[in-house]
């Protein structure tokens, strides 16, 4: 499976259950990359979407410990194993872990590629991602510098070594 996310200079990913950056080009990249695929997220990330609605035209898999949780249009799983069993019907490249911090950490061992947008700015945040540049198990294989809405960032791709 893959991961997709955006980070600040300090590897922050969110604050008050919202994203740090809402940049059109990054949103468009996320949409294009995940469209028609299976997306795996934590309950809090689902609830951070507008009206807590799942992402259209994608198979939305939501992880929660709450066995009574049953929002419309999502597949609910109560454990990592349930997610792995459910997503095994897909080609591994067609499954994207889309956050948040708890769920990225849980699925890191199963991940092969990480599509990471690196914003060149710091912002107050309360959720972080592991600093991939300090890890031996992933390496950056592509960097594309961009600028949008006055913000500099890079589209990068990390692959398991
Ligand atoms: N920068 C980005 O690209 C990006 C992407 C996505 C999200 N985010 C940000 O990340 C933040 C949310 O992240 P988060 O870490 O607070 O929440 P999260 O990972 O979205 O969801 C956490 C929830 O997942 C469930 N969960 C966690 N471990 C579980 C397990 N082992 N078994 C079953 N269920 C489990 C629990 O749900 P229950 O409490 O219901 O049991 C837990 O409260 C927000 O600020 C969001 O905007 C950023």
Image: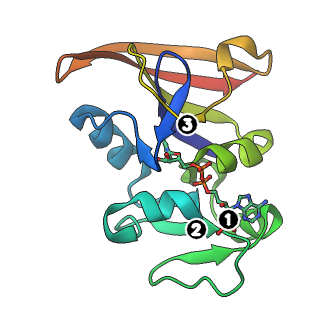
From this view, report whether residue 78 is shown above or below residue 44.
Answer: below
87 left or right of 145 in image: right
Instruction: Find the distance from the CA under tag 1 to the CA under tag 2.
Output: 9 Å
In this view, 88 is above or below 95 = below
The quarter of the displayed image where residue 113 is located? top right
Taking depth in this image into account, of 19 and 37 the one nearest to the observer is 19
> Residue 109's spot in the image, x, y percent?
80, 40
| Mark 1, secondary structure of its residue | helix
Q: In which quadrant of the rendered image does the C terminus lie?
A: top right
Ligand 1: which quarter?
Answer: bottom right
Q: Name the residue under label 2.
A: 61
Judge the density around disc 2: few (<14), some (14-19), many (≥20) Cα neighbours within 10 Å: many
Judging by the rendered image, the residue that carries numbered circle 3 is 126
Give the SS element for disc 2.
strand
The secondary element bearing badge 3 is classed as loop
- Which residue lies under the disc numbered 1? 87
Measure the alpha-carbon separation of dots 3 and 2: 24 Å
Which of the pair 42/35 is nearer the observer?
42
The residue at 29%/38% (across/down) is 22
**Mark 3 surroundings: few (<14), some (14-19) or many (≥20) residues within 10 A:** some
Instruction: Specify whether residue 49 is in view.
Output: yes
> Is the distance from the Cβ of mark 3 to the nearest ligand 1 atom less than 8 Å?
yes
In contact (CB < 8 Å): disc 1 and disc 2: yes
Residue depth check, mark 1 versus mark 3: number of the one nearer the observer:
3
Q: Of marks 3 and 2, which one's residue comes earlier in the chain?
A: 2
Of discs 1 and 2, which sits in the foreground? Answer: 2
């Amino acid at each position: 499976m893959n991961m997709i996310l955006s980070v600040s200079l300090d590897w922050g990913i969110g604050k008050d259950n919202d994203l740090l950056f809402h940049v059109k080009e990054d949103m468009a990249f996320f949409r294009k990359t995940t469209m028609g695929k299976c997306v795996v997220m934590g309950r809090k990330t689902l609830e951070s979407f507008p009206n807590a609605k799942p992402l259209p035209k994608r198979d939305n898999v939501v992880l929660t410990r709450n066995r009574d949780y049953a929002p419309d249009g999502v597949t609910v799983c109560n454990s990592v194993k349930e997610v792995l069993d459910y997503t095994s019907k897909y080609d591994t490249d067609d499954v994207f872990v889309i956050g948040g911090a708890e769920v990225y950490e849980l699925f890191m061992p199963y991940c092969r590629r990480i599509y990471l947008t690196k914003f060149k700015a710091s912002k107050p945040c309360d959720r972080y991602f592991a600093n991939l540049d300090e890890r031996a198990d992933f390496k950056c294989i592509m960097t594309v510098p961009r600028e949008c809405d006055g913000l500099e960032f890079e589209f990068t791709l990390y692959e398991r070594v």
